[in-house]
Amino acid sequence: MRLFKNGTIASEETPELQKADILVDDEGVIHQIAETIEAVDGSTTVDCDGCVIVPGMFDLNVHAREPGFEHKETLSSCGEAAIHGGVTGLVLMPDTAPPVDSGNLVKSLQDLVSEVSRIPMHTSGCLTKKREGKELAGFSGMASRGVTMLTDADHEVPCPDLLRRCMEYAKDFDLLVTTHGDTPALTKAGAINEGHVSYKLGLPGIPAISQEIALDRDIRVAQHTGARLHLQQVSTANSLKSIAAAKEAGTQVTCEVSPYHLLLTEEDADDYNTHFKMDPPLRLQSDCEALIRGLLDGAIDAIASNHAPHTEFEKSADFASAPFGISGLETTVLALFDRFISEGTFGWNLLVKKYSAEPRRIVNLDPVKIAEGEKAEFFIFDPNGETLVSKDYLKTKSPVSPFLGQTLKGAIRETVI
Ligand SMILES: [Zn+2]
């Protein structure tokens, strides 16, 4: 038995934290929660004085890179990074080599996950074979293996008629379709937001309309087919307006935002630092402000890190040719605490709602609860601590993060799973 003493429990329902002791039995089930619990014979006491006990987070957008790109990340290192960051469940993107586009490949990946991961990693499957946007992937096989969503990850399905058929089939199988709004004809070889920073640095730009047009199209097709649609990595104020209007019209659409698009702007990438190169690119301060409002007013359903590791060597290329993507699993809770919760912009309840409860609901899982009889799945957060985000600190194989070298307020003491 482990007794977590003198902590305060966070929940999605209320900004108030509940002061309570938690007794977890040897099977990992929460045996008792009460204002005071005395240590029992054979129990170990964990002092949680001053700490917040937070339900385990769930990340809808994770690229674990295995199979195919194990030099960037493996399922094992990805799982350990997640646990280190307070994340106790996630959805794997299917953009591995080979891409996960059939029931057999889903099964192989699930077998691999069950061997190496200490947390649930849910598999997604491709919308189109090999993510090539030419023909439908094996929907029925993947559905029978229990994929949580269908997505071509950061590839847009180019033909609207093919996307329509994807959504029609997905609806028949009651599967969620997930897209990452991007219009290749507008994005071209862009590396950074199109605007005064791209002009100043002489880098090819990605205009905001690249996301907005694709997202509008995907919403229209979802409205037409009645399929459930989830939109990844919303990055502009106009994208959010479209989503809010679609929700108003009763469309079954949800969306996520990354911590970076809430916290950082194109100005942060001003010195060609590839740790700020991500897809979609960092936008403007006015976009950040709109996204924060959307998070508070409910237009944005979830936070997702888009954990997209690459080696330091790959990211050391010049800005235009370095790959898009950074590691996010270990810094999302810390960065959002540092910039928002500790500043009073929002409370723990909002973070629990948007990064733990809602993401699970989007893929039809039950939210994690800290309650008697439930499995213990939480992390202990010390708001008075601090964390130096260093290479030593990070457990991912890819120490590529815009927060690298920074000291963030708060510290994750332990994740209990
Ligand atoms: Zn992604």
Image (cartoon, helix red, strand yellow):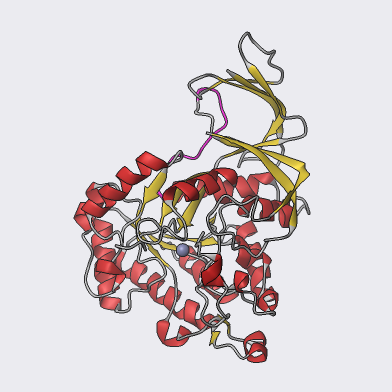
Residue 326 in the image, given as x and y percentages of width and height: 55, 64
Quarter of the picture containing the N terminus is: top right
The extreme top residue here reads 41
Count how many numbered circles sit on residues in the image. Answer: 0
262 is higher (above) or lower (below) than 190? above
Q: Is residue 301 above or below residue 182?
A: above
The foreground one among 18 and 262 is: 262
Query: In the rendered view, does 354 fall on the left or right side of 113?
Result: right
Quadrant assignment, res 15: top right
Q: Is residue 348 left or right of residue 178?
A: right
Q: Residue at horizontal 62%, vertical 91%?
A: 202
Magenta span = 363-373
Q: Is residue 128 above or below residue 295?
A: below
Reply yes or no: does residue 372 show up in magenta: yes
Q: Nearer the viewer, residue 317 or 252?
A: 317
Is residue 128 visible from the viewing direction of this image? no
- The prevailing secondary structure element of the residues shown in magenta is loop
Q: Is residue 166 left or right of residue 196?
A: left
Percent of width and height locating residue 10: 65, 38
Q: Is residue 171 visible?
A: yes
Residue at left 50%, top 65%?
Answer: 310
The image shows residue 159 at horizontal and vertical percentages of 29, 79
